[in-house]
Amino acid sequence: MITTPDNDNNFDGPMIFIIIGKGYESEASEGIDLHILLKAPDDDTAVREALNALAEEGFIEADLDQIGMLTEIPAEEPHASAYQGAVDGEVAIIRFS
């Protein structure tokens, strides 16, 4: 996996993306609000890896509403732990019910 940014942002830290959306585990479900944190070289890769991780977790569909890059380490849980997991190469999925 490429770990260096392929853009001109010159960001010094790891590129940790947060994707906000809703995941569906069945066609009849109302959906679960999600925050997904992961390290990726660009937003296209981040979206692709997030969708793959959601499929592995049993989601059949997802609506991804927003994507951004975290510029500071989150101080509060569950995002602080998810951030550390993303730095370590994991795709962290936070579910809100």
Image (cartoon, rainbow, N blue to C red):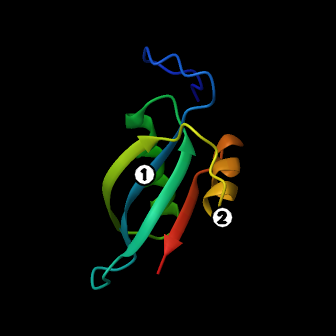
Is 76 above or below relative to 10?
below
Image height of 49 relative to 53, above or below: above
Q: Residue at x 61, y 58 (%)?
A: 79
Up the image or down, 24 lies above or below 91; here it is: below
Query: In screen coordinates, is 28 left or right of 56?
Result: left
The residue to which callout 1 is attached is 19
18 versus 1 height, above or below: below
Task: Identify residue for label 2.
Answer: 77
Whole-angstrom CA distance, mark 1 to mark 2, is 17 Å
Image coordinates of residue 8 in percent, x first then y, are 43, 14
Q: Position of residue 67 (x, y in %)?
A: 38, 46
Name the quadrant containing residue 94.
bottom right
Q: Nearer the viewer, residue 71 or 6?
A: 71
Q: Disc 1 or 2, which lies upstream in sequence?
A: 1
Q: Nearer the viewer, residue 58 or 29?
A: 29
Q: Residue at x 45, y 19 (%)?
A: 9
**Mark 1 surroundings within 10 Å by alpha-carbon count, few (fewer than 14), some (14 through 19), many (20 or more):** many
Percent coordinates x, y for residue 30 in the rendering: 30, 82
Q: Inspect the image, locate mark 1, and give the three-letter code of the amino acid beneath it.
A: Ile
Task: Say which element carries label 1.
Answer: strand
Q: Residue at x 72, y 43 (%)?
A: 88
Instruction: Specify whether 20 is left or right of 56.
Output: left
Q: For the residue carrying disc 2, how many other residues have a C-alpha within 10 Å: few (<14), some (14-19), or many (20+)?
A: few
Whole-percent x, y for residue 78 in the image: 63, 64
Relative to 8, is 14 on the left or the right? right
Q: Quadrant of the N terminus?
A: top right
The kind of residue tagged 2 is: Glu
Q: Nearer the viewer, mark 1 or mark 2?
A: 2
